[in-house]
Image (cartoon, rainbow, N blue to C red):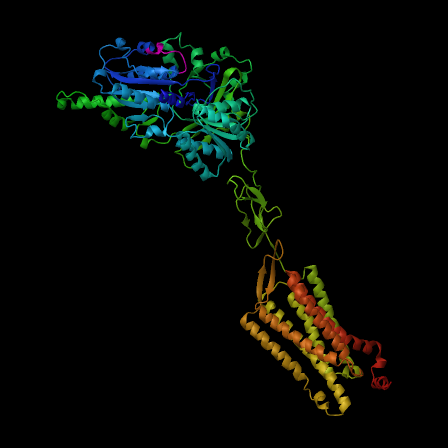
């Protein structure tokens, strides 16, 4: 008894009211007032073949024995299917299909399954083939547990083999060929259902959804399929409510499940599992508490409730996924001709069989406007409607045709083997029929392909319906799309936006995402422990962009481009250099020309006053060499301005190094001249030879030769070249001269610094000598200024970028050259031009005497 009760608790209440015809709008009426503790619906049938024709009275008599209720729709579907087969001249000629009803009840009285009376034989003409049947054909459903129980009880109490066909949802347990060798499931596996659901979620960009399933093997397998497909498409489960079947355990956790849905940011919740267990109780409780969610369900959850508010401006409702089937016509006419009084429009509507003949165009679906809070069943009866099959009814329809083909094949084999069977009789064993049934495949009259080999069954197409509930137990179901797994990936889902807008009132669907979209200019950033659908948005790094929404990585701009301020696209960089059109370049060029012109003027003045005492002092030849080298130093700055090329890049550094070496070595020679001049004055004629022999000019030649050797090595190892700097200035590409060998560059600069330091040291030591012909103080200040400029140059040069770096180098050249010119020659120029009275031997001697 405990086992029977346990089986009963596993049984389902079939609420299979989904319609699979081309029409898009379906009106549905609630069966009855909701009652707590609804009992299971179970219907099982015996199928037989008889040598007779069967009239409709046969079906009417059988159906009249049933207690009116929801289970009668299965018997109606079976009656229609067998009648259609019997009227088919190409199937079972001279024979008919009939069925018995061992049980079809809403009550859990399982003992009623035991007796198997041969009822209704009296209305069949001729004779029945049942006595020759060694195998009973049993059609059970829609509950898988009831199907298992029927087979167990029948085999136990009758010791007779049973070939069983089941209608209702597919269950993996029933697919076990070892445990159930003669059982065939008419339903398909739910693999295409999962694909359809995930594709639908992706269509509306819903990547954060909740899931509530029953705690059983079938739902766990569905969860496994769902997780696999979601991971492929980056769709995440916000929560998984695994609803236990045990009532006490469920009641202890019911509030937890409710709070989990309420606190979750997921607006979409998938419901899958038993429709007559604790999951159904949860679903009713969630709806009664006013939880506004988009419920994604299967056709088994196509229910109408009478407590829902009529809110057309919200998308919240049920989305039902159902297997696609062709349209069966003439069903209503068949049913009402059986008993017009019993099967009235109102009765059929109560069975939830009716739908309106709305066209596919939303513009033609006007009946919704007529639905108000005062809508009634009487108004509904005035509308034109047809009959629609549920999934289980289609399974019954295909099962009848499958067995008709099996019987047809067996009778053909009987005729072919009759001359050789020698009176052995007909082989109607379950093994024989199972073998034929497993190989049976055909196209049903409605155009659906049926294959009884479960391993070869093709994936089913799915229809998608939006279900809206209204007051007074009325509901509207609108077909909004279709999913076909046979189309290329990305084209499998077809939705009608017009029907969606008509059914929901808007094309803008509520979002169901874990994180807000990352706008262009930002990228996703995942923290440790976060789901793949949950992320933060951070700006793209410098010079990287993201021009689409929700980009995982930013894209780096090419070298010749840069990111705009919003970091949404790359822009071409402007090519710049220190040009003569640049204000800085113009200013530096003017300073260079002015300094050069001033140096030339000083040289001209010195040449004009060539025989004066102040020009002759300290070797006028060295003064001329120094002035010409300083003028070249000024002019070499122009090589740094303008578009760089290979020639100018080489000339910049080589000219700078050689010319400044000449200038500094000349200062060194002049400093030595001061010292030697003092020695000549102090010791007579011993040092005169060094002053007049031109030996001091060798200092300039030797120092310059060493610098030329260093520059030659520089050119031979790694000469300067034109380089492109795309990083120093944002939005610009700088064309600069690269130094080539940095070591060689600093060797040239370091050698020049050593000469300057030597000149400064010698001049500093001679600064206190009598100043009649002494310019040691001027030379000391000039070298001090020169060294200060270039020592300051190094850190400033390396702290700047782009054309500012070039400007710093030009400024250092101009400043050091101007320092030497000003310190050495400006005082003399002042005496020559403004104080000529001091530029004579007499005045010099008077000054010396005083």
Q: Nearer the viewer, residue 494 or 775?
A: 775
In the drawing, does residue 561 fall left or right of residue 795? left
User: Is 268 rendered above or below residue 546?
Assistant: above
Instruction: Name the quarter where the C terminus is drawn.
Output: bottom right
Q: Main secondary structure of the magenta part?
A: loop
Q: Quadrant of residue 98?
A: top left
Kindly tell me whether residue 400 is visible in this rendering. Answer: no
65 in magenta: yes
Total of numbered circles in the picture? 0
Instruction: Name the quarter where the N terminus is drawn.
Output: top left
User: Is 263 rendered above or below residue 638?
Assistant: above
Q: Nearer the viewer, residue 81 or 102?
A: 102
Q: Quadrant of residue 515?
A: top right
In the drawing, does residue 763 fall left or right of residue 14? right
Q: Nearer the viewer, residue 339 or 68?
A: 68
Q: Position of residue 343 (x, y in %)?
A: 40, 10
In the drawing, does residue 739 fall left or right of residue 359? right
496 in magenta: no
Kindly tell me whether residue 531 is visible in this rendering. Answer: yes
In the drawing, does residue 94 fall left or right of residue 538? left
Q: Quadrant of residue 337?
A: top left
Look at 53% across and 39% down and name the residue there. 534
Q: Position of residue 646 (x, y in %)?
A: 57, 67
**Which residue appears farthest toward the bottom when viewing the image?**
685
Q: Nearer the viewer, residue 247 or 481?
A: 247
Q: Position of residue 176 (x, y in %)?
A: 32, 30
**Which residue appears farthest toward the top when viewing the image?**
341
Q: Give the magenta-colored segment's residue range.
A: 62-70
Q: Position of residue 522 (x, y in %)?
A: 58, 44
User: Is 334 rendered above or below residue 658?
Assistant: above
């Amino acid at each position: 008894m405990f086992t029977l009760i346990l089986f009963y608790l596993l049984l389902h209440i079939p609420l299979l009211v989904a319609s699979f015809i081309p029409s898009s709008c379906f009106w549905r009426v609630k069966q009855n007032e909701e009652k707590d503790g609804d009992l299971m619906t179970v219907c099982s049938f015996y199928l037989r073949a008889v040598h007779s024709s069967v009239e409709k009275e046969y079906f009417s008599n059988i159906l009249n024995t049933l207690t009116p209720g929801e289970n009668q729709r299965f018997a109606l579907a079976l009656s229609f299917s067998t009648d259609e087969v019997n009227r088919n001249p190409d199937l079972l000629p001279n024979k008919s299909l009939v069925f018995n009803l061992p049980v079809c009840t809403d009550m859990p009285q399982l003992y009623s399954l035991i007796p198997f009376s041969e009822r209704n034989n009296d209305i069949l003409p001729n004779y029945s083939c049942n006595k020759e049947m060694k195998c009973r054909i049993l059609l059970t459903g829609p509950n898988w547990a009831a199907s298992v129980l029927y087979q167990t009880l029948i085999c136990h109490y009758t010791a007779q083999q049973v070939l069983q066909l089941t209608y209702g949802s597919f269950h993996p347990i029933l697919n076990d060929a070892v445990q159930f060798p003669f059982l065939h499931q008419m339903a398909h596996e739910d693999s295409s259902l999962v694909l359809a659901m995930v594709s639908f979620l992706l269509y509306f960009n819903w990547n954060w959804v909740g899931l509530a399933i029953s705690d059983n093997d079938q739902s766990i397998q569905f969860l496994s399929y769902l997780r696999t497909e979601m991971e492929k498409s980056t769709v995440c489960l916000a929560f998984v409510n695994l609803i236990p079947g045990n009532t006490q355990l469920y009641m202890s956790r019911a509030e937890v499940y409710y709070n989990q849905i309420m606190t979750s940011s997921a607006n979409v919740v998938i419901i899958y599992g038993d429709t007559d267990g604790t999951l159904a109780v949860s679903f009713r409780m969630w709806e009664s508490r006013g939880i506004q969610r988009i419920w994604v369900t299967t056709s088994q959850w196509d229910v109408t409730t009478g407590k829902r508010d009529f809110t057309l401006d919200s998308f919240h409702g049920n989305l039902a996924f159902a297997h696609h089937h062709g349209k069966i016509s003439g069903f209503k006419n068949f049913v009402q001709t059986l008993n017009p009084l019993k099967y009235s429009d109102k009765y059929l509507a109560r069975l939830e069989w009716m739908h309106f003949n709305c066209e596919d165009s939303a513009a033609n679906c006007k009946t919704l406007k007529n639905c108000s809070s005062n809508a009634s069943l009487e108004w509904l009866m005035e509308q034109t409607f047809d009959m629609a099959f549920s999934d289980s009814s289609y399974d019954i329809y295909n099962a009848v045709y499958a067995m008709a083909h099996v019987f047809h094949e067996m009778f053909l084999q009987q005729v072919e083997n009759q001359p050789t069977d020698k009176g052995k009789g007909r082989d109607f064993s379950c093994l024989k029929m199972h073998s034929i049934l497993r190989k049976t495949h055909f196209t049903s009259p409605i155009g659906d392909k049926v294959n009884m080999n479960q391993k070869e069954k093709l994936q089913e197409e799915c229809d998608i319906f939006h279900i809206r509930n209204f007051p007074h137990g009325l509901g509207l179901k609108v077909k909004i799309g279709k999913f076909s797994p046979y189309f290329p990936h990305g084209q499998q889902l077809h939705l009608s936006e017009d029907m969606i807008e008509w059914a929901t009132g808007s094309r803008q669907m509520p979002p169901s995402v874990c994180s807000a979209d990352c706008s262009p200019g930002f990228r996703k950033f995942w923290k440790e422990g976060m789901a793949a659908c949950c992320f933060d948005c951070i700006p793209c790094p410098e010079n990287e962009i993201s021009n689409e929404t929700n980009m995982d990585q930013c894209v780096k701009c090419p070298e010749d481009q840069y990111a705009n301020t919003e970091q949404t696209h790359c822009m071409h960089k402007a090519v710049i250099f220190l040009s003569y059109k640049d204000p800085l370049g113009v200013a530096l060029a003017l300073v260079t020309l002015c300094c050069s012109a001033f140096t030339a003027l000083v040289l001209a003045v010195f040449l004009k006053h060539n025989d004066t005492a102040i020009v002759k002092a300290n070797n006028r030849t060295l003064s001329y060499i120094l002035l010409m080298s300083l003028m070249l130093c000024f002019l070499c700055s122009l090589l740094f301005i303008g578009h760089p090329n290979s020639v100018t890049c080489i000339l910049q550094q080589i000219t700078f190094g050689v010319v400044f070496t000449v200038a500094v070595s000349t200062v060194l020679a002049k400093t030595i001249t001061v010292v030697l001049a003092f020695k000549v004055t102090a010791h007579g004629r011993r040092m005169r030879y060094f002053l007049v022999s031109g030996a001091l000019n060798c200092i300039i030649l030797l120092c310059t030769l060493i610098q030329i050797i260093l520059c030659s090595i520089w050119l031979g190892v790694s000469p300067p070249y034109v380089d492109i700097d795309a990083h120093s200035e944002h939005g610009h590409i700088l064309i600069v001269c690269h130094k080539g060998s940095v070591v060689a560059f600093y060797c040239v600069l370091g050698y020049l610094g050593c000469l300057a330091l030597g000149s400064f040291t010698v001049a500093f030591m001679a600064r206190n000598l009598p100043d009649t012909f002494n310019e040691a103080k001027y030379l000391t200040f000039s070298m001090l200024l020169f060294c200060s400029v270039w020592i300051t140059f190094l850190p400033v040069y390396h702290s700047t970028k782009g054309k500012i770096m070039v400007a710093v180098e030009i400024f250092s050249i101009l400043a050091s050259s101007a320092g030497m010119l000003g310190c050495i020659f400006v005082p003399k120029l002042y005496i020559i031009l403004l104080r000529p009275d001091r530029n004579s031997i007499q005045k010099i001697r008077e000054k010396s005497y005083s």
